[in-house]
Amino acid sequence: QVQLVESGGGLVQPGGSLRLSCAALGLSFNPLDMSWYRQAPGKERALVAYITIGDGNTNYANSVKGRFTISRDNAKNTVYLQMNSLKPEDTAVYFCNARTMHPTTGEENDYWGQGTQVTVSS
């Protein structure tokens, strides 16, 4: 029973900050990487940031570079998304993703959280 538990969403004024957390529970293997996606009403789900679990390499969408930081705590299979200088355009449901690969077969699976709402409004 795999569960990605997201927390930290809420309502914040423009220019404010939020920190999202995602803990991956019940995985048979450590994830290869974990990611944050977001989906605004009427928009397709888009990658915000990802981080490789082994070495901590990161990648960000251009729209959040310099404002958002993804990090991980490997001991807890947890990733964080520190969001600073938030804009109304950041309003979306934020989803956590974890990707795994079987150590011998190479089979890949990915898992999704249920999403956490981030609303940036004055």
Image (cartoon, rainbow, N blue to C red):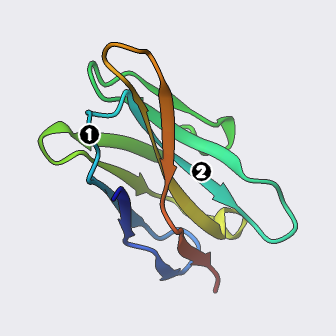
| Element on which disc 1 rests | loop
Identify which residue, 27 or 117, lies in the foreground. 27
> Is residue 67 among what the camera can see?
no
Tell me which amino acid carries mark 1. Ser
Residue density around tag 2, few if under 14, some if 14–19, many if 20 or more, within 10 Å: some
Q: Identify the amino acid type marked 2.
A: Tyr
| Residue that carries the numbered disc 1 in the rendered image | 28
Q: Is residue 6 above or below residue 97?
A: below
Out of 87 and 23, give the one closest to the viewer. 23
- Can see residue 29? yes
| Above/below status of 96 relative to 93 | above
Query: x, y (%) of residue 6?
Result: 39, 66
Please tell me which residue is depicted at 56% across the width and 73% down the height of the picture.
118
Which residue is found at the position 48% from the left and 23% from the top?
107
Question: Which x, y percent locates residue 41?
Answer: 80, 71
Quarter occupied by the C terminus: bottom right
Residue 70's quadrant in the figure? top left
